[in-house]
Amino acid sequence: ELKVEQNPLFLSMQEGKNYTIYCNYSTTSDRLYWYRQDPGKSLESLFVLLSNGAVKQEGRLMASLDTKARLSTLHITAAVHDLSATYFCAGPYTGTASKLTFGTGTRLQVTL
Amino acid sequence: AAGVIQSPRHLIKEKRETATLKCYPIPRHDTVYWYQQGPGQDPQFLISFYEKMQSDKGSIPDRFSAQQFSDYHSELNMSSLELGDSALYFCASSLVSGGPGNEQFFGPGTRLTVL
């Protein structure tokens, strides 16, 4: 049974600071997904990481994937208040119509 | 761009009642997934359909059933509702046979409250 673990579970950071969220998963997967969720809202797809060594960046967020270590990271650069949300990693990809198993989520709070 | 549509957005039911949630996937998407998210929890996979056939099943109670219709929309039927069924229910869709990554796009969710 796949397990997806994120840490930290809660992160309070000041605007302008950098931080990394870690996502470890327990079974082989060549792709990993990151989603953002605002309270009571839907899940917004942020990144689809398709291979070992994949790195994607969008604005102040950068995600990477190391399939050998079964580790993905979401790095936040110079945080701003608008990034406050819960971030989930999810995987694995096991084939056609593969379900997602989500991590526990990291609730990010960016303070002024 | 068209997104996943879910209805209703909010639903209040009494214990032991039934509820039907509807999902309209992004046009041309061939796969639909249902997830349940309790308060403060991560989404849990319930069931999925690929080309109108059930493709995977997760921790879905026997009281729940779902199907995908010829127009690819899907319905989640929930009977004998319990207080613990109160949650956000998300539908997601993807295009398995094309596009990289099998990316799932989520609808806005249906908030079900059981009293």
Image (tube, rainbow, N blue to C red):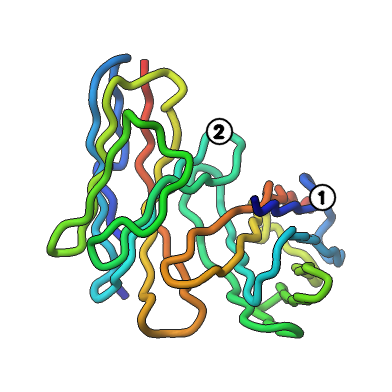
In the rendered structure, find residue B39 and report the number of the disc placed on it. 2
Tell me if I can see residue B107 in this picture.
Answer: no
Say which residue appears at 58% left-offset and 75% top-offset.
Answer: A48
Residue type for callout 2: Pro
Say which residue appears at 54% left-offset and 68% top-offset.
Answer: A94
Vertical position of residue A45 compared to residue B34: above or below: below
Q: Nearer the viewer, residue A66 or A1?
A: A1
Estimate the spatial distance between the alpha carbons at disc 2 and disc 1, rounded to whole Å.
Answer: 19 Å
Vertical position of residue A112 compared to residue B12: above or below: below
Labels 2 & 1 near each other (Cβ < 8 A)? no
Vertical position of residue A82 compared to residue B81: above or below: below
Disc 2 crowd, CA 10 A, few/some/many (<14, 14-19, 20+): few
Provide the secondary structure element on which disc 2 rests. Answer: loop
Query: Is residue B67 toward the left or the right of residue A65 in the image?
Result: left
Q: Chain of mark 2?
A: B
Q: How many marks?
A: 2
Residue type for callout 1: Pro
Image spot of residue B21 (x, y percent): 26, 41
Disc 1 crowd, CA 10 A, few/some/many (<14, 14-19, 20+): some
Q: Quadrant of the N terminus of chain B?
A: bottom left
Tell me if I can see residue B89 in this picture.
Answer: yes
In the rendered structure, find residue A8 and report the number of the disc placed on it. 1
Say which residue appears at 73% left-offset and 83% top-offset.
Answer: A52
Q: Quadrant of the C terminus of chain B?
A: top left
Q: Chain of mark 1?
A: A
Query: Is residue A91 toward the left or the right of residue A13 in the image?
Result: left
Image spot of residue B17 (x, y percent): 24, 19
Vertical position of residue B22 compared to residue B84: above or below: below
